[in-house]
Image (cartoon, grey):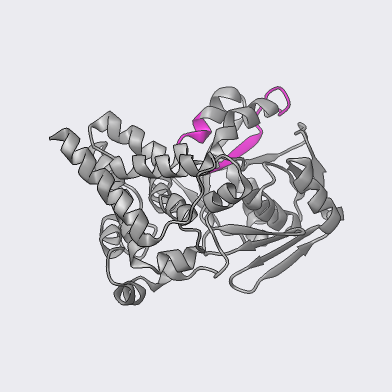
Amino acid sequence: MSFRVTVLGAGSIGCYVGGRLAAAGAEVTFVGRPRILDELNTHGLRLTDLDGKNVTVEPTAFRTATEPTGEADLVLITVKSAGTATAAAELAGVLAPGTVVLSLQNGIGNDAVIREILPTCVVLPGMVMFNVVHRGEGRFHRGTAGTVDIADDPVLTRFTGVFARSGLGFKRHADLLSIQWAKLLLNLNNPINALSGRPLREELGSRDYRRCLALAQREALAAMAAARIRPARLTPMPPELMARLLTAPDGVFRRVAGRVLAIDPVARSSMADDLAAGRATEIPWLCGEIVSLGAMVGIPTPVNQKLIELVTAAENGDRRTWSGAELLAQLEDAVCDDAANEG
């Protein structure tokens, strides 16, 4: 049975996931900006990954639109978190009651925003656990391992087959919230990668950048512990131990956690792409989430606050490439200043 799938937010993630579903036989409509839609209509889609897979989807195998219609069995919302309410509002009054809407977005709580605007739909949170690089001319490359993870619900059963055929890796979870918090911990590397100006594998292969990430993660873990939030284990070892391992010398880190560096050499964070394109980033939904949680439970979060300030400055035109040592010094100074103010 074929399903009608609307991808609202035809960016890197939306085009890759939607393209794989189209190749598996779904009737996919991409909704996005005219620039990207023109690219898809001209070149179609060529979807590759670090494992050597190469999938071509001709322009005749999908549809494009600048606005969503009600002709959908499944809607994938893949816009940036700042656009969640707007995207949901575009669907209001258009979708039939009972339509399944998946929020495949970074951050915590996007599904609640969507559910409030679309109360008659079945709104479920999800996570795309891999990185996608847009290489132009309809080419989208998955640069890291990962799956599409969804909060479990009986309505998902009818879509299991098409996701299986797509090869995306479709996982259903009784408790997705713990996975969202764990993914947020990993995504705290996004601002560090964006400020470094380096590909992910190169950045994570450098101890000073990893020490920056460890500082951000330790703050986050302290705030989560105070709020009684237990993030899931997504890496070879528990989050608390991984945060400590990040500070190990490069050789030790590669031996113990080599899977973390199983990343395509060209892969960069989505935040790096946003800064390069002059777009607003998702920093309020990443480090900002930790700062808000820390304020709620009385845990200081100067490192995440400093990352917000540095990324915001870059968004406003103060662009520079930070070495690992320079960025680490900024974050350590932020910790010292906060401790002095507290004293």
Residue 169 in sight from this viewpoint: yes
Q: Position of residue 307 (x, y in %)?
A: 39, 45
Q: Position of residue 208 (x, y in %)?
A: 33, 63
Q: Position of residue 263 (x, y in %)?
A: 50, 68
Say left or right for 203 vs 120: left
Name which residue lies at 40% across and 69% down: 205
Residue 281 in sight from this viewpoint: no
Residue range (magenta): 92-112
Say left or right for 202 vs 118: left
Name which residue lies at 51% across and 41% down: 282
The kind of secondary structure the magenta stretch mainly shows is loop
250 vs 240: above or below: below
In which image quadrant can residue 77 be found?
top right
Task: State yes or no: residue 119 in magenta.
Answer: no
Q: Nearer the viewer, residue 225 or 147?
A: 225
Q: Nearer the viewer, residue 221 or 310?
A: 310
Task: State yes or no: residue 100 in magenta.
Answer: yes
Name which residue lies at 61% across and 44% down: 278
Say left or right for 257 vs 164: left
Q: Nearer the viewer, residue 212 or 106?
A: 212
